[in-house]
Image: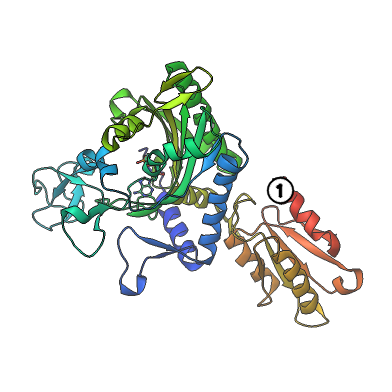
Amino acid sequence: MASPTPNSEQKMQSVVSLCRRRAFIFQSSEIYGGLNGCWDYGPLGVELKWNIKQAWWRDMVMSRDDVVGVDCSILMNPRTWEASGHVQSFTDPMVDCTKCKGRFRADQISNNQCPSCGTKNSFTETRQFNLMFKTYVGAVEDNSSQTYLRPETCQGIFANFANIVSTSRVKVPFGIAQIGKAFRNEINPRNFIFRSREFEQMEMEFFVRPEPQEAEKWFEYWKTFRYDWYLKHGISKERLHLRIHEPSELAHYAAGCADIEYDFPFGRSELEGVANRTDYDLKKHSEFSKKDLSYFDAETQKRYFPYVIEPSAGVDRALLAFLCDAYTEEPERVVLKFHPKIAPVKVAIFPLVNKDGMPDLAEKIYKELKHRWNCFYDDKGAVGRRYRRQDEAGTPFCVTVDGESTASYTVTIRERDSMLQERVAIDQIQTYVAKRLEGA
Ligand code: GAP
């Protein structure tokens, strides 16, 4: 992780406090003091999250002929996690401070000094700590009923591989995608929503012929496709990086991996991983389930275990990157310069004053636009303050109904970043906004 810039701590604090103030993100069960590593999304946050997931689904599934979607259960037969290797090796090295009883990841300790109480050489021996949350299915709490909350969504995809092949018209190369919750009992959840204990993933397993060149070709393809996806949705190029893993860093199942990294205010860190998982997972699940998960290729008349290329992204991490990237302090205002496609509110509608038929007309416009986009109606306070409120929410367009509107049947539309205003005929508002949103 690269070191943070001098004012980055301040920037992170400003982002966190804006998130709280403007109802993007709250601590989970805050009234009880919260729960470390768990977060709730408020009215603006949930819209932003939906828009990110929808943008991913549109580009990874809907607009393609070679990817289908699934939505699998969070609880799975525990054999899944034996086959995947998680029971044996999904661990982090952990130490306890004997002085303050704090628990830390051993690889994040420097100079043998406790990050909490500052005591030196106070740690226990390093132990391996499994990150999966255990739970019990049914009324009896014993080993036979124990399972886990899934620590990644992709195993549901592998477990359904044969179902999809036998029921859908998919032919290698093809992908299966899923968005959903994952849970990891992280030793040190930190950096706001960056490392949480409950989070969401957007994963796609892309099955290809098991020839090294074929896997390499698709690995390159998805690496570039995913990097470009963040740029397309507004992340600045200078803060986005691709890092190829050294062989020593690779997970036990991977033949290659590239991280898409972002320069967060707390340093450069992983946003998404693109991995060549080889035929490891399908072979392991075949072995453990005793079901044949090999694939018959009608074109080559051969049976084989496909290789898998996996782009695996975190929804919450992407959301944090979009927030940090959009956060801009200008002399007169704080503005979230979201790409219009992911902005939580697309249009705000203001009657300039509460008289002369303005509210009626503004409400009529609001109701019409609301069918199509998430909109916000605001008739409170000076118009300048209303603009500032929408700037902080990242709303790309503000429509103001003013003194001229009832007579000329026009409004002004103010664009968030340039703050320029244009007078537009009321029956042209939808075309105006659609052109800028969809063409963006
Ligand atoms: N199926 C492969 C897999 O799960 P991973 O690198 O462990 O790989 C993929 O996770 C992505 O999930 C990460 O790049 C990150 O965006 C997100 N992620 C992982 N752990 C997370 C956590 N504790 N909090 C938030 N997001 C997390």
Amino acid found under the numbered disc labelled 1: Glu
Q: In the image, is 378 to the left or to the right of 288? A: right
Q: Can the viewer see residue 223?
A: yes
State whether residue 120 is above or below residue 247: below
Q: Quadrant of the C terminus?
A: top right
> Could you say where residue 247 lies in the image, as x and y percent from the top left?
31, 23
Task: Determine the image quadrant of residue 99.
Answer: bottom left
> Could you say where residue 90 lies in the image, as x and y percent from the top left?
25, 41
State whether residue 327 is above or below residue 56: below
Q: In the image, is 257 to the left or to the right of 349? A: left
- Ligand 1 resides in the quarter of the picture at top left
Q: Which residue, given by chain and number where applicable, does mark 1 sit on?
A: 438
Q: In the image, is 183 to the left or to the right of 344? A: left
Q: How is the image coloured?
A: rainbow
* Camera-side residue of 308 and 239: 308
Question: Element under label 1?
Answer: helix
* Camera-side residue of 402 and 437: 437
State whether residue 358 is above or below residue 265: below
Q: Quadrant of the N terminus?
A: top left
Q: In the image, is 304 to the left or to the right of 123? A: right
> Could you say where residue 216 lies in the image, as x and y percent from the top left?
46, 21
